[in-house]
Image: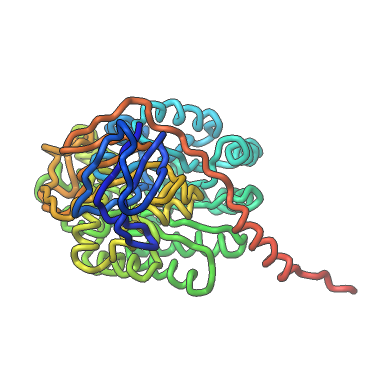
Amino acid sequence: MTVLIKGGTVVNADQTLRADVLCQDGLIAAVGEGLDAPKGAAIVDAGGQYVMPGGIDPHTHMQLPFMGTVASEDFETGTAAGLAGGTTMIIDFVIPGPQQDIMEAYHQWREWAEKSVSDYTFHVAITWWDDSVHEAMGTLVREHGVNSFKHFMAYKGAIMADDEILVNSFSRAIELGAIVTVHAENGELVFRLQQELFDRGITGPEGHPLSRPPQCEGEAANRAIRIAEVLGVPLYIVHNSCQQSLEAITRARNEGQRVFGEVLAGHLLIDDSVYRHEDFEVAAAHVMSPPFRSAEHQAALWRGLQSGNLQTTATDHCCFCADQKAMGRDDFRRIPNGTGGVENRMEVLWHHGVSTGRLTMNEFVAVTSSNAAQIFNVYPRKGSISVGADADIVVWDPEATKTISAKTHFQKVDYNIFEGMTVKGCSSHTLSQGKVVYADGKLDVERGAGRYVHRPPFAAYYDALKIQAKRNEPTPVKR
Ligand code: URQ
Ligand code: ZN
Ligand code: ZN
């Protein structure tokens, strides 16, 4: 399959240049002005458009079994929806149940993901601890290309990792050259607040944000940062939703600690008024954790992206339809937590980020693709328009407008948190592995075409840590 993308402007995180892009055998074969089309090549006219690395969404949960149900979006429909919005790779999560064999869970998720239509990989959650978990982490890094381990500090009684698990897992990650990631909410505090609110008769979705105030997130973010600091492991905090966790990250980064922060498109653009909507369905559709926050938190999160204290954007795409959300009609604690967005992340960020002047186009590429590729060690195979990189490309039409709606989206869910939002700038063509898989508003995907992406451990980080540890080597007092 040979495709020549002609007449566009290439936008990478580090540079913008007028160039054609030739894709052959799934890779980028040439980038330059005036390229000729080899015989039989398909031509994509990118005149007046931007040619950017396909988006990487570092946080999705396709067909996740959770809170007594299963997320409605599966790996085939979810990766297809992502392609329609310019996202060409997802990083999903293997989430073993308490005491579930880690490798068994890993193989289960690998099987579920085989139907993906674009590339994917997994963070593996550490939800419990014993010697077998210690062992499995080694197997996953050495034999399965996993270099990131997730920890849910929330969800007491289900998948919550307490400090003992965090310390054991973070320490093991260092030995293996892996990075650790956390969902930072204090699960004990949330559990207590949920109970108190429910007992006071607050049973509706309005109770959800009240039970998870930003202080619960700030405490957990800071705790994870301090544990990572003492143990010397790089840390990535997912879905930062508030000033408190951003402040914790900013302080740590200013002190030279290797901490990275992610923000969801939803947390940048949707506020907590949704939880007081008179319709249960609308309020419940927005129940996700951490919850959407007030406008001042959104402004802080945009500043976090602009300042570089937050490096990636994601969606936490974890969809539940109205009938599933209704499981919590009489008890907000039972509303399955999760919202969608994998299809709309890039267009809403372009419209509210680039078109408003908050972000340059290069910064847009960085936060939607390149930074995630670098942090999770798949750059420049992913996240770059350069010779030899995978031909995962989005041709972006800055003049195209669309109104987002569940009535027209490809996502397999009956609600869209960006419902009715009109955006200017979206994908006109998406290429996955050098094939045009989205054009003229239509998908042309193939079930199972997606590949599992192996991610090597981080030698560079750990060499630096070893030097640092040597420098600080304590010496016993001679008595
Ligand atoms: O916490 C997560 O990231 C998963 C369980 C999705 N749900 C959510 O509310 N964020
Ligand atoms: Zn989470
Ligand atoms: Zn998540």
Residue 331 can be seen in this image: no
Could you tell whether 175 is left or right of 451 in the image?
right
Q: Quadrant of residue 69?
A: top left
Image quarter in which the N terminus is found = top left
Q: Position of residue 395 (x, y in %)?
A: 25, 47
Q: Height in image: 246 above or below 157? A: below
Q: Quadrant of residue 79?
A: top left
Q: Position of residue 398 (x, y in %)?
A: 18, 55
* Residue at the extreme right of the image, as rendered: 479
Q: Residue at x 45, y 42 (%)?
A: 159
Q: Height in image: 39 above or below 315? A: above
Q: Nearer the viewer, residue 265 or 126?
A: 265
Q: Position of residue 253 (x, y in %)?
A: 48, 69
Q: How is the image coloured?
A: rainbow
Residue 113 can be seen in this image: yes
Q: Residue at x 47, y 51 (%)?
A: 379
Image quarter in which the C terminus is found = bottom right
Q: Residue at x 21, y 45 (%)?
A: 45
The image shows a total of numbered marks equal to 0
Q: Quadrant of residue 157?
A: top left
Q: Height in image: 199 above or below 105? A: below
Q: Position of residue 378 (x, y in %)?
A: 48, 47
